[in-house]
Amino acid sequence: MGRLITNQRILFHHPSAQEGAWLRALSEALPDWELVKWQPGEAAADLAIAWAPPQQLLDEQPGLKVMFHLGAGVDALWSLRRPPQMQVVRLEDAGMAEQMVDYALYAVTRHTRDFTNYEQDWRAGSWTPRRVRPNHEWQIGIMGYGALGARVAAVLQSRGYGVHAWSRSPKHGTGVVHHHGMGGLAAFLQQAHVLIVLLPLTADTRHLLNADRLAQLPKGAYFINMARGALVDTDALAQALTSGHLAGAVLDVFEQEPLSPAHPLRQMPNVIGTPHIAAQTWIPEAVQSIAGNIRAWQDNNPLHGVVDPLRAY
Ligand code: NDP
Ligand code: OXD
């Protein structure tokens, strides 16, 4: 039986150059609903679609039933006071997994095929071929085996790399070597020639990669963070990169974004950074996913991407 709906309005909040495009695509996909650009003092609604909503929106809408978040990670929303009954629904994949795969392939091969060294050789006028180690000699550790991590793992495995994954719960029959929980973390880190971070940022994972854990990686390991900057202690990371314990890093995310132009990470020749673009939210894929979820909600069917309020991801 369908849900009794009290009003057909959805609040929208994503102030950006693409706001108009979002509103047009959502209105087309949800013709029975009125999409309202949220402003302070807006009348009450059951549903909202937002990226980084302000605290005022949540305070003024205590009756919100579902917030559709325009991203995969909900850590920013989790730091706000939320109506207790409000479900949070995040984007699951929605076009992001393939972007993550491309980013991971670039970052991994930057290290495994020695591209950082070749860039430096090139500038120095040097001509120094290095031995190519076959992919199966490299063990890639992926932290997080969710919508994004599992896809990255599958593609790296299809490229012949040894792939290990670490998650909260055990997984079986995935074809990759699995480790789980805090008890499995040291063994996972100790074999990772390349570490890819694809975890959500929660109270359990904040600064999980501290100096001690980075020290558990093999000497010369390579560090790739495509998830959230605060998963790693930035000072400890900079120290491990300076000491040579880590050979280098590709970083898409930082504790403070944008990263300051004067930050020491910017001066390190073995580090390359990008401005939080590893996977962007694409409008058609996101709208399709949200519209499908809203129809499911109207029909009292289960939604996908519902954030577990206890785990916060
Ligand atoms: P999912 O929620 O689908 O997967 C999360 C994975 O992390 C799961 O395997 C989960 O384990 C594991 N995990 C969570 N907490 C712990 C813990 N305490 N210990 C061990 N494992 C844990 O997330 P997604 O794959 O969709 O996204 C991952 C993150 O990527 C997002 O949260 C976001 O921060 C980031 N992101 C970054 C983007 C960028 O452009 N840089 C773009 C999109 C996302 P289990 O399987 O057992 O539940
Ligand atoms: C996300 C992000 O979580 O853009 O979707 O980082």
Image (tube, rainbow, N blue to C red):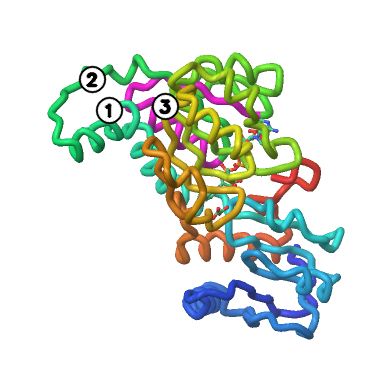
Q: Secondary structure at mark 2?
A: loop
Residue for point 83% across, 71% down: 59
Q: Which residue bears the numbered disc 3?
A: 247
Q: Do the residues under discs 1 and 3 have CB atoms within 8 angstroms?
A: no
Q: Do the residues under discs 1 and 2 have CB atoms within 8 angstroms?
A: yes
Q: Secondary structure at mark 3?
A: strand
Q: Secondary structure at mark 1?
A: loop
- Dot 2, how many residues are within 10 Å of its Cα: few (below 14), some (14-19), or many (20+)? few
- Dot 1, how many residues are within 10 Å of its Cα: few (below 14), some (14-19), or many (20+)? some
Residue 132's label in the rendered image is 2
Residue for point 50% across, 77% down: 28
Where is residue 64 shown, x and y percent of the image? 79, 69
- Dot 3, how many residues are within 10 Å of its Cα: few (below 14), some (14-19), or many (20+)? some
Closest to the observer, 270 or 158: 270
Up-down relation of residue 34 to residue 310 (above or below): below
Where is residue 241 shown, x and y percent of the image? 48, 31
| Count of marks overlaid on the render | 3
Marks 1 and 2, how far apart in space?
7 Å
Name the residue type under label 1. Answer: Arg
Where is residue 58 shown, x and y percent of the image? 79, 69
Q: Is residue 274 left or right of residue 32?
A: left
Q: Quadrant of ligand 2?
A: bottom right
Closest to the observer, 286 or 13: 13
> Does any portion of residue 175 appear in the rendered image?
no
Name the residue type under label 3. Answer: Ala
Q: Quadrant of the N terminus?
A: bottom right
Q: Which residue bears the numbered disc 1?
A: 113
The answer to which of marks 2 and 3 sits earlier in the sequence is: 2
Up-down relation of residue 14 to residue 247 (above or below): below
